[in-house]
Amino acid sequence: MTSRRERLLASEPAAQAAKDAFASIYVSGRDDRAVGLGLNGNGNDWAVKVFVHSAAAAREIPDHFGNFEVDVEVTGPATPR
């Protein structure tokens, strides 16, 4: 487990750069999308995490960006409490 953690820590700057590049292309100026960085479904590599308001917005998002998976979740719009 330590080697996986070390590999993830070593690759974090590249993953962060990919997330930032992804955001500049697919999220910037869009209030119906948010982006973050997390682990892929297997927990062994980074993934760009995207939250969108609608299924239509989700269809505009690629499933990979560079060497990273892109996980999209349709959350619907945020509503005030």
Image: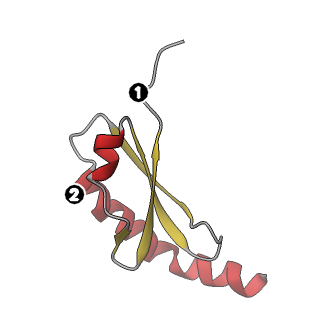
Would you call the spot at circle 2 few (<14 residues within 10 Å), some (14-19), or many (20 or more)? few
Quadrant where the image shows the C terminus? top right
In the image as oriented, which residue stretches furthest toward the bottom? 3
In the image as oriented, which residue stretches furthest toward the top? 81
Residue at 36% across / 41% down in the picture? Answer: 55
Which residue has dot 1 on it? 77
Which residue has dot 2 on it? 25
For this view, does 35 lie left or right of residue 43? left
In the rendered view, tell whether residue 1 sits above or below residue 52: below
Which numbered disc, 2 or 1, marks the residue that appears first in the sequence? Answer: 2
Residue 19: where, in percent of width, then height? 38, 63
Q: Amino acid at mark 2?
A: Ile
Residue 30 lies in what quarter of the image? top left
Q: Which mark is residue 20?
A: none
Q: Amino acid at mark 1?
A: Pro
Q: Which structural element holds mark 1?
A: loop
Residue 69 lies in what quarter of the image? bottom left
Residue at 28% across / 48% down in the picture? Answer: 27
Residue at 30% across / 61% down in the picture? Answer: 22
In the rendered view, tell whether residue 11 sits above or below residue 46: below
Q: Which of labels 2 and 1 is toward the front? A: 1
User: Which residue is more in the foreground, 58 or 77?
Assistant: 58
Q: Which structural element holds mark 2?
A: helix
Residue 63: where, in percent of width, then height? 37, 65
For this view, does 13 lie left or right of residue 60? right
User: Which residue is more in the foreground, 15 or 45?
Assistant: 45
In the rendered view, tell whether residue 43 sits above or below residue 73: below
Quadrant where the image shows the N terminus? bottom right
In the rendered view, tell whether residue 61 sits above or below residue 2: above
